[in-house]
Amino acid sequence: QQSVDRNHDLVRNVVFMGMGEPLNNYDNVVAACKGLVDCRRWNLRHERVTVSTVGVTPKIQKFTEDMPELALALSLHAPNQSARSAIVPAAKAYPIEGLIDALDNHMMSGFGNKKTSNTSNIVGGYSEEQRKSASKRKRAMIEYVMLEGETSSFECAHQLGKLCENRRLIVNLIPYNQTDVKDKLRCPPREHIEKFQDIVRSYGSFCYIRKTMGADIAGACGQLVVEKEQNSSSRPVADDIEDIGRSGKGDNEKGGKTSNKVARKSESSSLADELSRKGSETDCGGCSAEIEAWIKPLAIATALAAGAFAISTIFILTKRKRC
């Protein structure tokens, strides 16, 4: 039990992300969330559990009713309906304005009495003081992948800023981690992302650039890749992990059969074979001489140890007889 308690203490944050749409598995996700915040089980603070969604408006509203104290993240990726529909297929069913309102209502749940004053500090029916208080209790976040092209333009930065203006939503700009997939997507330069961030911040939103880790070993977010072995002599290309076991157009163009293996496993095997080969070529040539050099000293040491043991035994037996 003590070991389990220590392991629980090591878990501080839980995020439902990268596993399919959580809200389409609603009952199981909510049950898991309840277990995570249950004081008799994992006992996590409510704001430490985050559910990320691509944006299913009715499910977001239901989630607000059932789990109002948990954090919620919306994978937005574009600030207007047409641009978002082009890169997020599910966006066609749910208008972007309704998603932002649902996200905002989730953050402000618990403040049932809206202020209806027409003063300038009222946004969405809530005062600035109410929003400050709500942001201290939980987080409502927008995830925005930075891709070269329309969605990372400064015009889109202004649109994103206006969409979140004075709502105290947290905007996370996520630099795209490039892979060798057929769609050659790229991340804008760091200077461009920082300028984009400044524009969004100018509208009163909290905007941060997500730190990328693991890109040097293809282990960053979105970089679970495999190496496709081809019969040709061309350099292997990296595919998405989801493509394992699927036959694509590129696999059959030359009639050749291809197999997918995890890149790390392939590289490790090659490295092991290379080391084994080099070891057999360079090390074994001198191993006999090294062994022979050690045989004589070891034989002498063994003889001395045996002699000392025999003398000690005779001495002890003689002493016993005298006694």
Image (cartoon, helix red, strand yellow):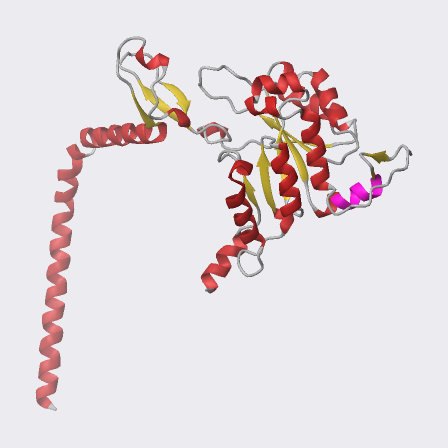
Residue 283 visible in this rendered orientation of the protein: yes
Asked where in the image residue 248 lies, by quadrant, the reply is: top left
* Helix, strand or loop for the magenta stretch, by majority: helix
| Quadrant containing the C terminus in the rendered view | bottom left
Residue 67 visible in this rendered orientation of the protein: no
Residue farthest toward the top in the current orientation of the protein:
254
Would you place residue 150 above or below residue 20 in this image? above
Which percent across, then down, holds residue 259? 29, 22
Q: Is residue 139 left or right of residue 36?
A: right
Which percent across, then down, holds residue 205? 75, 32
Which percent across, then down, holds residue 180? 44, 19
Asked where in the image residue 309 lies, by quadrant, the reply is: bottom left
Which span of residues is magenta-colored? 127-134
Q: Is residue 77 left or right of residue 239?
A: right
Name which residue lies at 28% across and 30% down. Answer: 269
Would you place residue 51 above or below residue 314 in this image? above
Magenta span contains residue 132: yes
Name which residue lies at 66% across and 24% down. Answer: 95
- Relative depth, front residue between 250 and 321: 250
